[in-house]
Every structure is written in structure tokens, then in C-alpha cells.
């Protein structure tokens, strides 16, 4: 069980106004469940996710994993506790001059597995799970985006974590590859019992993968619901941001002036006009 209790994270860069990225958030994620966190850009989703493994240490509040408050641990105890928490990112974060196998072994090196034989065995086991054993000797540049993300998942799984944190895991992938990666995450959750927390701005990811949903806005969780409610056509979130996020498709403001009404100063130009946003 992950318990966030009154967590706040304030970025106070020298000489700038402080930014409250996470504002008094409390959240409980039951063991073995999949928690989605959704919201617009800048809502505080990634910061909250990084609070869970203290990659970003909260300014206030408690972060408990199975009852242990990570914020109270000393450096060595925190290092040990982090082995229970894997993480994957939108950009995969693989090391390009290492092979797939070496990339997966990295997390084991960092977690203190010193002998090469058990490291290789655990890396092979993790690559089996994401069905990439045949790519062990390949380099990241030789892989597709989906395969890179599967290597990143294997790297996260190699330490046999209890929790997997996913920061926009499919944002860089096409819809077909997204479905494949989400299927691996669902299988890992079901078969290994790993608790998954996924941050996304894509409601489709939430719908396909999660059990519980938290909607964030301005650093706060403004709404929660069970993901199965999204499959009920009559369901309507209670906040306007929740409603916007569940509404289908992209909305574009069509009230802007037509493109033949050019801003003053451009009418007389003989040069072709580049229109920002490619709306032509
Ligand atoms: N290291 C940092 N230093 C200063 N401000 C930061 C830092 N990290 C994040 N912020 C600010 O905190 C706020 C929340 O950022 P965060 O990345 O958590 O949002 P997000 O919902 O994940 O956004 P996105 O979907 O665009 O990744 C933003 O205003 C951001 O600019």
C-alpha cells in the first residue's frame, strides 16, 4: 500500500517566486492496484509521482510504502527501500552505448548486486517478461520506441520491485505500440502483483489500464473516481476539468479570425506567410 499524507512540494528557486507543484495531497493506493493520475500540463502529476520514490523530496508530508515513512529514512535505508520501487519514463532513459542486457543490468548494479552471474540471470528473467530476450545484445538505436520502453520496463522489473511508477509511459508511442506496452503493464500487475501508478494526460491510457483515477489541477487532487465508471455512458465527472478530460477528442477554438484576415503589417508582404500551429 502506498499512502501519501498531506504531501506538498514547493520549488523555491533562488530569486524567483516559489512554485507549489504539489499542494497538500493525500492519496492511498491499495497494494496490487493500478492508480492513474491525470491532468493537464503543469498540474503537478510528475512531481507527485517523483514524490513517491523521493526522487523529488516533498517539502511537507509523509510518503509511506507498506507502513514505512520514506521521508524518515536515512540515506542507506532509503537506497534499500528504493529497490522496491521501479520507474519508467516517457523518454525511455536508456544508455545508448550499452546493450539492452547491460541497460537492464544497470538497475541491479545500482541496487548492489555485485556478482555478474546473478545480474545476468536477473536481467535475462526481466527481458523474458517483456519478450525481448532475443534483443539482449542489441543497442537502443536498433530498437523501435515500443521495444525501448519494454527494455525500460525490464530494467525497472529487474530489481523485483513491489511498485512501478510510470511517467507518461506511452506518450512517445503510436496507438498500436501504446496498446502493446499497456498490455505488458497490465500483465505485470496481474501476474506479479506489482502496484502500478501511472501519470498521463491521455484518458485512453486511464480507461485501458487503471483501477482508480485521480484528477490533478494546480497541484491538488480535485477529483477521484473508479476507472470502470468511464465505461458508463451516463458517467460525468463532477469537476469541469474532469469533464473536459473525459470528453472525446481534441477541442480547437474555431472562433479565431480566418486565415485570410492577416494581422496588420502582413497584408502587403509578397513573402509567403508561415502560420504558427499549421492551421492552414
Ligand atoms: N525542478 C523544478 N524546479 C522548479 N519548478 C518545477 C520543477 N519541476 C516542476 N516544476 C514546476 O512545477 C509545476 C508542476 O510540474 P510537473 O512537471 O509536476 O507537472 P505535470 O502535470 O507533470 O506537467 P507535464 O504533463 O507537462 O509533465 C510546474 O509549474 C512546473 O513548472
Image (cartoon, rainbow, N blue to C red):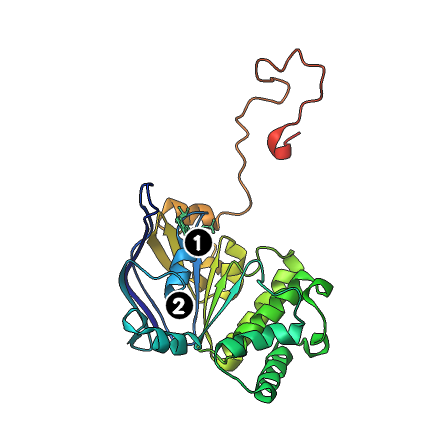
Query: Residue 236 or 279: which is nearer the viewer?
Result: 279
For the residues carrying marks 2 and 1, which lies nearer the camera in this image? 2
| Residue sitting farthest toward the top | 268
For the N terminus, the image quarter is: bottom left
Q: Residue at x 65, y 64 (%)?
A: 96
Residue wearing tag 1: 234
Q: Residue at x 52, y 54 (%)?
A: 202
Up the image or down, 122 lies above or below 149; here it is: below
Query: Residue 12 or 131: which is nearer the viewer?
Result: 12
Q: Secondary structure at mark 2?
A: loop
Residue wearing tag 2: 53
Q: Could one spot residue 183 in this view of the protein?
A: no
For the C terminus, the image quarter is: top right
187 vs 280, left or right, is left
20 vs 106, left or right, is left
Q: Residues within 10 Å of mark 1 (few under 14, many from 20)?
A: few
Task: Find residue 107 and report its horizontal and vertical position in percent.
Answer: 53, 75
Quarter of image, res 92? bottom right
Task: Find residue 182 and report its horizontal and vertical position in percent.
Answer: 57, 66
Query: Residue 241 or 115: which is nearer the viewer?
Result: 115
Up the image or down, 169 lies above or below 190; here it is: above
Amino acid at each position: 500500500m502506498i499512502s501519501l499524507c498531506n504531501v506538498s512540494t514547493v520549488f523555491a528557486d533562488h530569486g524567483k517566486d516559489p512554485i507549489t507543484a504539489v499542494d497538500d495531497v493525500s492519496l492511498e493506493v491499495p497494494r496490487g492496484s493500478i492508480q492513474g493520475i491525470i491532468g493537464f500540463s503543469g498540474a503537478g502529476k510528475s512531481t507527485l509521482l517523483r514524490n513517491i520514490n523521493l526522487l523529488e523530496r516533498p517539502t511537507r508530508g509523509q510518503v509511506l510504502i507498506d507502513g514505512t515513512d520514506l521521508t524518515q529514512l536515512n540515506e542507506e535505508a532509503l537506497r534499500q527501500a528504493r529497490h522496491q520501487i521501479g520507474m519508467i519514463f516517457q523518454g525511455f532513459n536508456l544508455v545508448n552505448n550499452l546493450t539492452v542486457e547491460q541497460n537492464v543490468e544497470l538497475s541491479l548494479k545500482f541496487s548492489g548486486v555485485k556478482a555478474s552471474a546473478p545480474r545476468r540471470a536477473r536481467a535475462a528473467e526481466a527481458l523474458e517478461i517483456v519478450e525481448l530476450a532475443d534483443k539482449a545484445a542489441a543497442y537502443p538505436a536498433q530498437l523501435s520506441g515500443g521495444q525501448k520502453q519494454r527494455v525500460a520496463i525490464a530494467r525497472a522489473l529487474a530489481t523485483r520491485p513491489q511498485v512501478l511508477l510510470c511517467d507518461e509511459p506511452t506518450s512517445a508511442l503510436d496507438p498500436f505500440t501504446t496498446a502493446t506496452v499497456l498490455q505488458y503493464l497490465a500483465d505485470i500487475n496481474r501476474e506479479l502483483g506489482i502496484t502500478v501508478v501511472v501519470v498521463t494526460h491521455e484518458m485512453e491510457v486511464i480507461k485501458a489500464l487503471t483501477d482508480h483515477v485521480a484528477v490533478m489541477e494546480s497541484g491538488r487532487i480535485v477529483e477521484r473516481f473508479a476507472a470502470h465508471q468511464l465505461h458508463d455512458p451516463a458517467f460525468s465527472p463532477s469537476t469541469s476539468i474532469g469533464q473536459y478530460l473525459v470528453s472525446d477528442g481534441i477541442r480547437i477554438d474555431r472562433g479565431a479570425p480566418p486565415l485570410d484576415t492577416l494581422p496588420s503589417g502582413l497584408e502587403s508582404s509578397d513573402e509567403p506567410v508561415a502560420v504558427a500551429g499549421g492551421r492552414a
